[in-house]
């Protein structure tokens, strides 16, 4: 794959797709942005609105509405189309509808001759990422999902409220399913390079009231807390998508927690799950294998068992 003009297509122009497009334009991440939606008029409206941002940005992004046939020379195709959870449902409950949509999208995109990178945001993102990989036939480095990138950001944001430190100075990840079974790899979380668990031990008087289980529970529930208040989430995931695309185009070699297809890493094969990876122009260059504690390994296994259970319902 070679990038000359940075071209991105977004399939699904609902609130997540539109927010991703807005982030891409405002951060000058791509040169061309193609919007595709079954609701053509919705896509046209979003394209018009996004085009009207250009005068206020520092470079020109060409925004167009198109079809799957136009994906031939796209560098990255972002899939946001899927079934949103209804009240009382989890992300996993949307699998049947999201899987049908994803299968149709991938088939149509691949007919165009597309040979770029698929970036999946549709929930349940880990299972849909795996499905996109299987349906596309592309190498595993060219298919990834947003995974626990947003959850890891939420973890840092929540921690920064307990410890008066910029979230960007906190480094760590949640792993596994982008859902209720995810967990925080506390053994690898650092603040300014110092292990978080060591900080807790040294500052018991001031930080002794921090409940780690409560914090990760807040992370797990954050999306639904937002959903209950405003209907759905879109700004955070839109920025996560933009960040991943930026790292790919810039060949950053940045490490982010995404949904990646494993092939022996962490002892797993034929599953997509949230793990830290190195991102380059080729997509996933390498899965970073953390030396998890015994407790963290158990939680990782439990999370992946949840994913496998639901994967089986759509034939994987």
Image: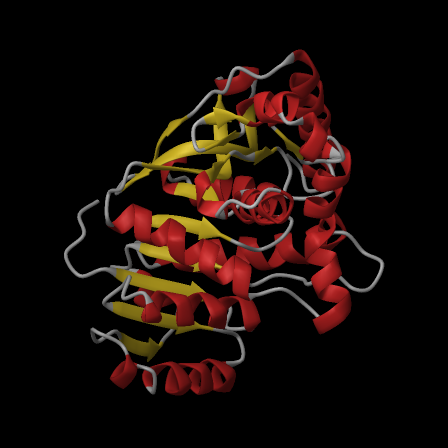
Q: In the figure, 56 relative to 80: above or below?
A: below
Q: Quadrant of the C terminus?
A: top right
Single out the residue that lies furthest toward the left: 4
Q: In the figure, 257 relative to 74: above or below?
A: above
Image-based side of 241 in relation to 202, left or right: left
Is 106 or 121 nearer to us in this picture? 121
Image-based side of 144 in relation to 200, left or right: left
Q: In the figure, 116 relative to 108: above or below?
A: above
Q: In the figure, 316 relative to 75: above or below?
A: above
Q: Please name the residue shown 45% across and 87% down the image.
A: 45
Q: Please name the residue shown 77% across and 66% down the image.
A: 228
Q: How many marks?
A: 0
Image-based side of 111 in relation to 157, left or right: left
Image-based side of 94 in relation to 247, left or right: right
Q: Please name the residue shown 39% across and 53% down the image.
A: 243
Is 108 or 89 nearer to us in this picture? 89
Q: Position of residue 113 (x, y in %)?
A: 30, 54
């Amino acid at each position: 794959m070679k990038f000359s003009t940075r071209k991105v297509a977004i399939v699904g122009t609902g609130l997540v797709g539109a927010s991703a497009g807005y982030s891409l334009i405002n951060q000058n991440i791509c040169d061309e942005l193609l919007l595709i939606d079954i609701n053509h008029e919705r896509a046209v409206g979003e394209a018009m609105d996004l085009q009207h941002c250009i005068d206020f940005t520092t470079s020109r992004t060409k925004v167009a509405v198109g079809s799957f046939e136009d994906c031939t020379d796209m560098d990255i195709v972002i899939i946001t189309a899927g079934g949103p959870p209804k009240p009382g449902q989890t992300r996993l409950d949307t699998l049947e509808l999201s899987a049908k949509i994803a299968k149709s999208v991938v088939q149509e995109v691949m007919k165009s001759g597309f040979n770029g990178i698929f970036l999946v945001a549709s929930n349940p993102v880990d299972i849909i990422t795996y499905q996109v990989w299987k349906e596309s036939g592309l190498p595993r480095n060219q298919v990834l999902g947003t995974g626990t990138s947003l959850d890891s950001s939420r973890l840092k944001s929540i921690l920064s409220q307990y410890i008066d430190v910029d979230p960007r100075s906190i480094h760590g990840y949640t792993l596994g399913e982008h859902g209720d079974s995810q967990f925080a790899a506390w053994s690898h979380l650092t603040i300014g390079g110092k292990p978080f668990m060591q900080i807790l031990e040294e500052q018991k008087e001031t930080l002794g009231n921090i409940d780690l289980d409560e914090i990760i529970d807040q992370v797990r529930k954050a999306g639904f807390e937002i959903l209950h208040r405003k209907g759905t989430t879109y700004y955070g995931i839109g920025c996560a998508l933009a960040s991943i695309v930026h790292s790919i185009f810039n060949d950053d070699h940045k490490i982010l927690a995404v949904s990646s297809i494993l092939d022996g890493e962490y002892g797993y094969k034929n599953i997509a799950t949230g793990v830290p990876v190195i991102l380059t122009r080729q997509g996933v260059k390498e899965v970073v294998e953390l030396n998890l504690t015994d407790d963290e390994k158990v939680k990782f296994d439990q999370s992946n068992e949840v994913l496998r259970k639901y994967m089986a319902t759509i034939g994987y």
